[in-house]
Image (cartoon, grey):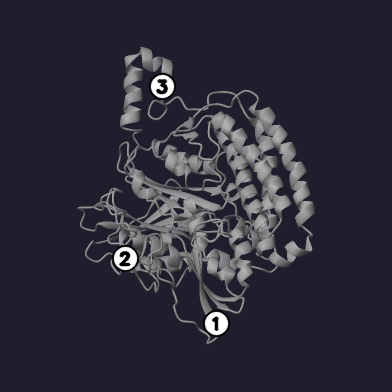
Amino acid sequence: MSAETRIANPVRPAFDTTLREDSVIVSIGPSHPATHGTIQIFTELDGEKVVRADVHCGYLHRGFEKECEDHTWHNLIPYVDRLNYCSALINDFAYCDAVEQMMGVAITPRCKYLRTLLSEYSRLADHLTCIAASLMELGAMTAFLYLVMLRDWIYEHLADLTGARVTYTYGRIGGLARDLPDGWLTRLDEILGKYEEFVDRVHGLMDRNRIFIDRTRDVGVISPTEAVNWGYTGPILRSTGVARDLRKDTPYLAYAELDFEVPVGIKGDNYDRYYVRMREMDESVHMIRQLVAMLPDGPVSVDDRRCTLPDKKLVYTEIESLINHFKLIMEGPQVPAGEIYVAHESANGELGFYLVSTGGGTPWKVHVRAPSFVHMGGAHRMLEGYQLADIIPTFGSINMIGGECDR
Amino acid sequence: MSDVLARVQGELAPMAQGASMSHGILVLPIARDSLVPVVRRLKSDFQFDLFLDVTAVDWPGEPLRFEVVHHFYSTRHFVRVRVKTRVAEQDPTVDSLVSLYDSARYMERECHDMYGIGFRGNPDLRPILLYEGFVGHPLRKDYPKQKEQPLVPYREGEK
């Protein structure tokens, strides 16, 4: 290849000389078959031991925030879905919550409980994906298939509700796209029953499994102080023993009315991160059952012409509704000038939306505080000092999701 | 307003240019030189131990064009503080917070990528979401959305 057409290296490693005479620098990724995510890790290896690591994300950057500045508040919901695509509904609801607070819109009771229920259901799907993938990477194929089977039932079940398996675009400013279809809650109960059956089997296969313990216990350890210092939130922070959970600490949606525990780990290693997620799923199931019992009747969207589209029948028969529909689609919901930061406890930790409006139908700025991105900043702390092969389970237990990491 | 935020407001307002509540978050607009002193006090005296986020807002045409926005959370008191610093286009730099929070290392890199904000004291401002050699700062309002800078040249007939 001639010099003119050679492709420049997109990444400059933090180090290109070794600290020790006999160590080597190895670049892992960006498309390594064992890391589920496009990420590059420069490592200095002393034999099999990782001396230093420099973690690079950004290979999937697609300009989410720039694109949002060119869409109406409503039209960017599909983009929000594509942040953490393992639990897209949580992104939807956090974003809608932020816009609703700016507009002073109060959602209906049914919407509040449904959003809570679906957030927990998404957390379940997200944790199932994370645990399944990390177990599979350690060779536990049976456990992987059990968990992914559950996840697939959840995906199909969510497709019945939203029309899509992964990226749902189900949240609306002021409510939800549609109410539950007939029989949805019955199927939900069946799936939760299956969940208990199969997660029990996974506990039986993994918890006291010598190989699994050897690969995960005391590997990728992070201390509570260090975790906070590096900005960790969510299951990783809780695995160190810090019981911080926004659902408990600053309850939003219907969390204040629910009975649930915040599971924590002891050592902050890979085993604890596995176990904290397993226990969190149990708590989510417990919450979903309470929410089904609490779910009130009524509309799922607020009756507010500033954000909710008028009934289709009225759009075709009444000029006011036609204009209302047209204005909401073409100009977007009018959000008063101001700024807001709203955070929800997503499956990976604090998912925050910082929105700035200058008044009008299009945001001036949309910024996401994405847990995955922040977690990558301190990832080298969990890799250094361990074996090369430990990168895979540790990286799996961090659960980096490219969509929200790179935006 | 929570007691902690009232105390923060009482004690830090003299270092800030006013203080106000916005959707449950205490907002402290401050001068550039007070950033590190204010944040140090937030961390040591009021337990704002979690550095959540840093980003910027571009206001083209204004004398101090960029507004650098920091968010902090206290894992003890469960409250948030937003610190806002205005900087001019000619010298868009603020002091880095890496001496107080290690999480600032990565997040400041992103803000540097996207807005070209300099963080004095951050030893590692290599591109993180963008690539080496990318020209410009894409989240600035004067960066055209459709502009392309492909690293891999398009083949004949593409584009």
Q: Residue at x 52, y 29 (%)?
A: A108
Determine whether the residue tagged by mark 3 lies in a helix, strand or loop: loop
Residue matched to label 1:
A23
Q: Chain of mark 1?
A: A
Q: Nearer the viewer, residue B147 or A4?
A: A4
In-front residue for pair A338/A178: A178
Q: Which mark is residue B133?
A: 2
Residue A12 falls in which quadrant of the image?
Answer: bottom left
Please tell me the numbered disc located at residue A49.
none
State the image coordinates of residue A118 (x, y, percent, origin top left): 59, 37
- The chain containing the residue under callout 2 comes to B
Q: Farthest residue in the bottom direction?
A: A21
Three-letter amino acid code at the position of disc 2: Gly
Compared with A135, A103 (above or below) is above
Question: Is residue A293 in view?
Answer: no
Q: Residues within 10 Å of mark 1 (few under 14, many from 20)?
A: some
Residue beneath the point at 56% across and 59% down = A33
Closer to viewer: mark 1 or mark 3: 1
Label 3 to label 2, Cα distance in Å?
49 Å
Instruction: Please name whichever residue, A394 or B66, is drawn nearer the observer in this view of the structure.
Output: A394
Q: Are marks 1 and 3 on the same chain?
A: yes
Name the residue beneath numbered marker 3. Answer: A310
For image coordinates 40% across by 30% down, the residue present is A307
- Chain of the residue under label 3: A
A67 up-or-down from A289: above or below: below
Cα separation between marks 1 and 3: 67 Å
Q: Is residue A134 left or right of residue A211?
A: left
Q: Name which quarter of the figure residue B12 lies in.
A: bottom left
Tag 1: residue type?
Answer: Ser
